[in-house]
Amino acid sequence: MNDLLIISHDVVGQRMAGPGIRMWELARTLARQIPVTLIAPRPIDLPSAPGITYGHYTWGDKTTLIPYLNGATTVLANGFVASAHPDLLTFRGRLIVDLYDPIVFENLELFRHRPFNEREEQTQRDLTLLRELLLRGDHFLCATERQRDLYIGGLLALGRVTPALIDVDPLLRNLIDVVPFGVSDDPPQASGQPALRGVLDDLNADHQIILWSSGLWDWLDPLTVVRAMPDVLAAVPQARLVFLAGRHPGQVPEMATLQQTSQLAADLGLLGNGIHFYNEWIPYARRADFLLEAAIMVSLHREHLETRYAAVRSRVLDHFWVGRPSIVSAGDAAAELIREHQAGEVVPIGDSQAVAAALIRLLTDQQYCAQQSAQAAALGQHLRWSQVIEPLRNVVINTQPREIVFMHTPNSSLLETLQRVRNDAIRVQERTWQLEQSLSPNPILRFIQRTILRFFANPQREHNAAALRSMYALAEQIDHTTQFLFQMNRQLQDLTGKINSLEEQVEGVINNLVTQIPEHKLRISNLEAGMQEHNQRQVVEIHQLGQQIRDFAEQIAGLEETTSQILAHIGGISAVPSQQNE
């Protein structure tokens, strides 16, 4: 069991978003069994928690993170940390990479309206980071089985799935397993402070609140529920839609969806009169106050890869925590969960009429709404952090030998092809670098060409010669480097074989010791019992010998007295006076 360093790439504190919440809850749950150090890009302003040491680093400044890495044996980090701190990839201990957030797909949506070149560059950076993480990580976490299939495909393409690994981990659960977002183990309790009612205009105790509890991110679809509200208000005049629209507490820029949603509500004449925006980020400890005031929750998305491979979002899980039915778009993991457990309504993507119908049914059919609420609360009990974290707990506590990722050895035929292409190019340079090879066979024309070359081609000839020399040096360097790398790879494989053999020997010795311990304990126990019995016999024998000595002394004293009396009787000698008389 090792101390654990958990690195969050997002803010952890009184106000935090999904990534920070995840790392905080993982740390809080694991700290019940092992010491945890939790660090974030800003100081953590939460009350102290048992078993957790807080720290912080500066995003992009490696000098602030390296001391934590140097003092750790096991690190759990969101993969995005490596984008600004590549030192994470060279960490010498055990690295657990959290891939719950499919950043490649998220950025495809986030940068959709940027210039195409910028989008291409961002995607290449994200793909490079993902490859590096999949090659380096010792263990991986993801949030759904769908994500797990996606990442196993990447691990397979990068050569991480091998016969040797399958022999010991047939389903790769030790390499990558599902740790979804969880539900707080603490039951929701209102603080008694007002949250929405009496705070926002036109919102009182009589209103039935429809709450959008997530952020207004560009990959979500709040516009569809706004378009549904005129029909909802016509059927249920007391309904009110509230967006929690506070600015992200971290470095995430404001997204276009917020302005678009507000503008659409204004265009429909419902802004502040049926549709409301709460423009502060809610403290994590107070979220129950806001959630418990709502009757129905809503979270919709557009159709794209981000939502298909997204985790069940933290705010949707909060719906289960407080036992409220949800209306969600079809196609993602949350929709599958809600449909399976009948914890709300699943609607087609972008269908405002279906959203309106689902809202009206839940707002007007109290029995149906109560049934869905009970199902949501029951689902939340099965998704508590203390339960969903079990695969991570096993990885952290039951330390396994670190898998070594060998350098990928290129196919020999491919190397031969590359070398042949390179050598052919060198031969062409050797034939043409002096330029004279292309002179005309006609003596007059050749004289003219040489005259021209003397004035204009000498610099080019020097350049060609230098380029050819560089090519020779580079080819030789590549050959030596390739040979060196192959030798190192073979040595590394030999060393690993020796390590594995040594581990087997050590394991055999340990097993022998383990099997011999009970026998030695029995021998020691028998020896202790024998020694105790022997000591007891000696004590008894000593007491008996002492008694015999006392008896013998008394007999001698009696014999002396008898002797004196006999002598006195025979010879008239008076008895020997006693010491008392003296």
Image (cartoon, helix red, strand yellow):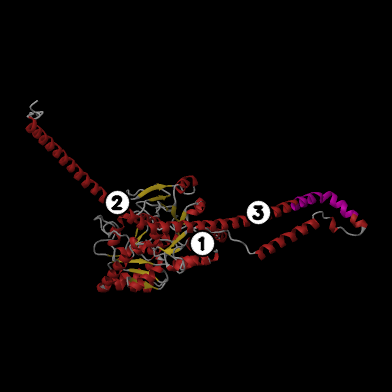
Circle 3 Cα neighbour tier, 10 Å, few/some/many (<14 / 14–19 / ≥20): few
- Could you tell me which residue is drawn at 27 percent across and 69 percent down? 374
Q: Amino acid at mark 3?
A: Thr
Mark closest to the chain's N terminus, 1 or 3: 1
Q: How far apart, in angstroms, are the residues tagged by discs 2 and 1?
A: 82 Å
Q: Quadrant of the C terminus?
A: top left
Q: Quadrant of the N terminus?
A: bottom left
Residue under label 1, please give it: 113
Q: Amino acid at mark 2?
A: Glu
- Could you tell me which residue is drawn at 49 percent across and 45 percent down? 63
Mark closest to the chain's N terminus, 2 or 1: 1
Residue under label 2, please give it: 528
Q: What's the mark number on residue 481?
A: 3
Q: Secondary structure at mark 2?
A: helix
The verdict on residue 452 being magenta is: yes
- Magenta segment: 447-468
Q: What's the mark number on residue 262?
A: none
| Residue 92 horizontal/vertical position (percent) | 49, 51
The verdict on residue 539 being magenta is: no
Q: State which mark lies toward you, 2 or 1.
A: 2
| Residue 537 horizontal/vertical position (percent) | 23, 49
Q: How far apart, in angstroms, are the residues tagged by discs 1 and 3?
A: 44 Å
Q: Secondary structure at mark 1?
A: loop
Q: Amino acid at mark 1?
A: His
Q: Main secondary structure of the magenta part?
A: helix
Q: Quadrant of residue 522?
A: bottom left
Residue 231 visible to the viewer? no
